[in-house]
Amino acid sequence: MLVNDGASAKLSHAAAMSLFIVSLVSFVVETQLTKYTQTSLGFRQPYMIFYVVHSSVAIIFPLHFLYLIVIEKHSPRGLIDGLRTAITAHMASSQLPARSSPFPTRPFILLSVILTVTFALPGLLWFISITLAPVSDVTAIWNTNAFWAYILTVKVYNLKWEPRKLMAVLIATTGVMIVVYGGHTNASSDSTPLVPTAGSPITGDILTLTASVIFGAYQVMYHKHVALRTSPKSALDDSYDPIPDEDTVGEDLTVIDRMVPPSPGLHANLLTSLIGFFTCILLWIPIPLLDYFNIEPFSLPTNAHTYFTIAGIAFAGVLFNAGFMILLGVWGPVITSVGNLLTIVLVLISDLMLRGSMDTITVWSLVGSGAIVSAFGVLAYDMLQSDE
């Protein structure tokens, strides 16, 4: 049996930061390609794009699994047995189980479906609210999920309020508000819903707030109940195979090839792939309903260029969502959610570089961006200090 030590059982700070950078860049690419698809290419199918992107994440686990077999030279059986052992122990809230312990198939499938629904629900609420409320309101309210993640983390884990962390989260949230409401010289462009409708802006704001709270809760609950923790050495007793001594030399011994805990990110990528799988088989249902009620008439791209662009969105979405799920287990909900606010800063920069949108760069957008970056820096520093 292969037993990872503490250093290899989780990502190093350098690896986690590299993954974080890849996730941020992937989100910016996904955002810009989505804008390009719906504006320049005229393919306005937001739910269809949402469905394709979220279904595409099903591919991440097979790719990771193949990498570990071909490049890292791990055995398929060892990886699968290691996952089975770790998941069985985690869901049983116990130490590592004996090899004969049955895998909790039904609870694990139920967990995957719950993750799919709770991961998709905020996105669906956002999709509805963007048709009711101004884009600026939806963007600002949605990004308060970092604040809710911190509040819920303190309550769920029964932690003491940390003034520095609370201040950092509030500064980041305020920075988002400043960027959204002060970062555009032409406010009228953001003062109307994306899709004209007779709905109430207040309803849209309430739906966005609900989505933000749910997403904050999802991050906290995932870290508490789903993410694997490095098993202590004492947890390996039930799976321990002794080294042969003089009395046992020559006897048939079974070598158990298992990696416990699993390779960093493998468990998170398994769940991410399952979310993609259940998205594919469950969340197609709204598509005919949206078409029937003429909310989003169904149509397919009319040219290969649009297909390739959507494939690019899906690829970037796979990288972002996989990175997000891994970091959620490694860093926790607070620093991950605040870190994701940096995408607002990067999208502003990319708009300037790709479109020459000088009107997006104002004193307010610079102040707000600085606040977000500073808040993340404070939380990252705290994390590094606590690990020393």
Image: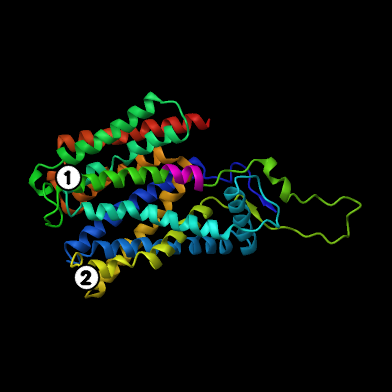
The answer to whether residue 336 of the structure is visible from this angle is yes
> Which element type, helix, strand or loop, lies under badge 1?
helix
Residue located 80% across and 49% down the image: 242
- Kindly identify the amino acid type of the residue bearing the numbered disc 1: Ile
Q: Residues within 10 Å of mark 2 (few under 14, many from 20)?
A: few
Residue located 84% across and 62% down the image: 252
Which residue is identified by label 1?
202
> Which region of the structure is painted magenta?
220-226
Q: Is residue 252 magenta?
A: no
Q: Tell me where residue 383 sits by quadrant.
A: top left
Residue 372, percent from left and from top: 29, 36
Q: Is residue 291 left or right of residue 164?
A: left
Q: How is the image coloured?
A: rainbow
Q: Tell me where residue 59 sits by quadrant.
A: bottom left
- Kindly identify the amino acid type of the residue bearing the numbered disc 2: Tyr
Q: Is residue 285 left or right of residue 155?
A: left
Q: Which mark is residue 71?
A: none
Residue located 38% across and 35% down the image: 150
Residue 73, percent from left and from top: 61, 61
Residue 144, percent from left and from top: 29, 39
Magenta-colored segment: predominant secondary structure: helix
Residue 54, percent from left and from top: 36, 60
Q: Which mark is residue 292?
A: 2
Image quarter (top left, top right, bottom left or bottom right) of the N terminus: bottom right
The reply to whether discs 2 and 1 touch (Cβ–Cβ < 8 Å) is no
